[in-house]
Image (cartoon, grey):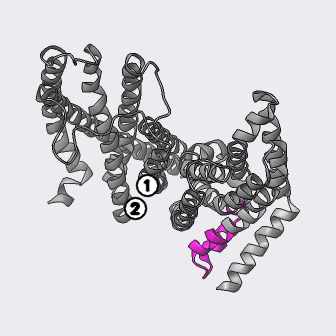
Amino acid sequence: MWTKLANPSFFLRWSGAAVPWLAALAAALLAVGLYMSFVLAPADYQQGETVRIMFIHVPAAWLALFLYATMSVSAIGSLVWRHPLADVSQKAAAPIGAAFTLVCLVTGALWGRPMWGTYWVWDARLTSVLVLFLMYCGVLALWRTIEEPGRAARAVSILTLVGFVNVPIVKFSVDWWNTLHQPASVLRLGGPTIHPSMLYPLLVMALAFTALAVTLHMYTMRTEIMRRRVRTLTLLEAERLDRRAAA
Amino acid sequence: MSRAFGALLARDLRLAARIGGSGVLGLIFFLMIVTLVPFSLGPDLNLLSRIGPAILWLSAVLATLIGLDRLFQADEEDGSLDLMIASPLPLELVVLAKGLAHWLTTGLPLALASPLFGLLVALDLTGMGAMVATLLVGTPALTFVGAVGAALTVSIRRGGLLLAILVLPLMIPTLIFGVSAANAALGGTVPFLTPFLILIALTLITVVIGVFAGAAALRAGE
């Protein structure tokens, strides 16, 4: 069943049907989430209105990691099964992940200015996210430089997986020279410390961002499959013309 | 198998010694960076000795990048890489031999010469000893992270810049623990051994990852 779903032609068919629904879902969730976080949620007693930046910042950070994980799983698919759809999924996830990482960094800086009095501090978490962004940049750069798609996919897979092993090490190293950033407050043992009036908007926004990421990912995968078809057709046509010229 | 390994190592060392002398060039580059720092920071010896280990480590990271882009590319261009892939010696050991040769001609000379450069940034005797020790155990990690990048960019012309972009983020942990070990030796609250042992662990992990990922990348590039 999975192998059938992952057949590129079949994927084009079912994803073509799914994308509009996913897009509508993402738009609806985003509308509700934004209304909840910018109208319904109360201002924080310490942070004031700036706390609303968190409703964008935190889901973006989650998605930045989630998309790197997606890339890593697809990388295994590329290396182990050499599945073309895994190549496509990897390639499609990279720019989206980089964009979410950038959103996370920028919103974090905007929040940091009024709260910490500075746009940037070399704190452990900020630095890890910056390194994550640099690794996304490396992955994107490698995709652009190797022209042959199959070879590019295998090379990028290795880079992605080496990066995946390295992310926890970077995180650990960077924690070594410690921190201004508050410890995790949503996903932790003993339940969330954040008040429900702020937790629900945050969760809705997280769902909305996930739906958005899935929509964009699927859409980009479709574009990439079609781009590859165009490439193959062009090569075939060139070959046909060559043969005709020779004959 | 160990004969083939030795032959490959000896060949790479001979090449490094005869063409370009990348070991000497690396040292000169290292000296250049260490010389540039006081021009940008000012000649205050107190400040320089405080940040000395950081300067030397940063210079070592940059100097390691020299010659990395040619690590496999030169062999790819003249076809000897194909012979190595076809040889009975596992490709992982080929990567190990070539990485070892690169380290012997860049990392090792840097580590041994670091007391000399330490003089320029007013390190005391303990500091110099710490620099030699940390560079000695830390630079192999830099080389083998670099070997992965070199294997990934093997067929890319002028891949040097891309290589730097790919491998520099992966060198951050080594840099952090190298500098903190050296600083710990100079005083501070952390005992020297804690970051130093982590640095050794990082090197061991990185050599393993680098050897396997490098070989996989070379196979993928065929």
Work out whether B43 lies above or below A72.
above
Q: Position of residue B152 (x, y in %)?
A: 56, 55
Residue at the (82%, 41%) spot, across then down: B32
Work out whether B197 lies above or below A57.
below
Q: Quadrant of residue B1?
A: bottom right
Task: Please check the rendered image and state whether residue B74 is part of the magenta-colored stretch, yes or no.
Answer: yes
Q: How many marks?
A: 2
Going by the image, does A166 lie left or right of B54? Answer: left
- Taking depth in this image into account, of A200 and B16 the one nearest to the observer is A200
Q: Which residue is mark 2?
A: A79
In the rendered image, the quadrant that contains the N terminus of chain A is: bottom left
Which stretch appears magenta? B70-98
> Judging from the image, what secondary structure is the residue with disc 2 in?
helix
Q: Chain of mark 1?
A: A
Q: Quadrant of residue A222?
A: top left
Amino acid type of the residue that numbered disc 1 sits on in the rendered structure: Ser
Going by the image, does B108 lie left or right of B89? Answer: right
Amino acid type of the residue that numbered disc 2 sits on in the rendered structure: Leu
> Judging from the image, what secondary structure is the residue with disc 1 in?
helix
Q: Position of residue A112 (x, y in %)?
A: 40, 22
Q: Which residue is mark 1?
A: A157
- Taking depth in this image into account, of B173 and A247 the one nearest to the observer is B173
Residue at the (80%, 48%) spot, across then down: B118
CB contact under 8 Å: marks 2 and 1: yes
Work out whether A193 lies above or below B10.
above
Work out whether A176 lies above or below B3.
above
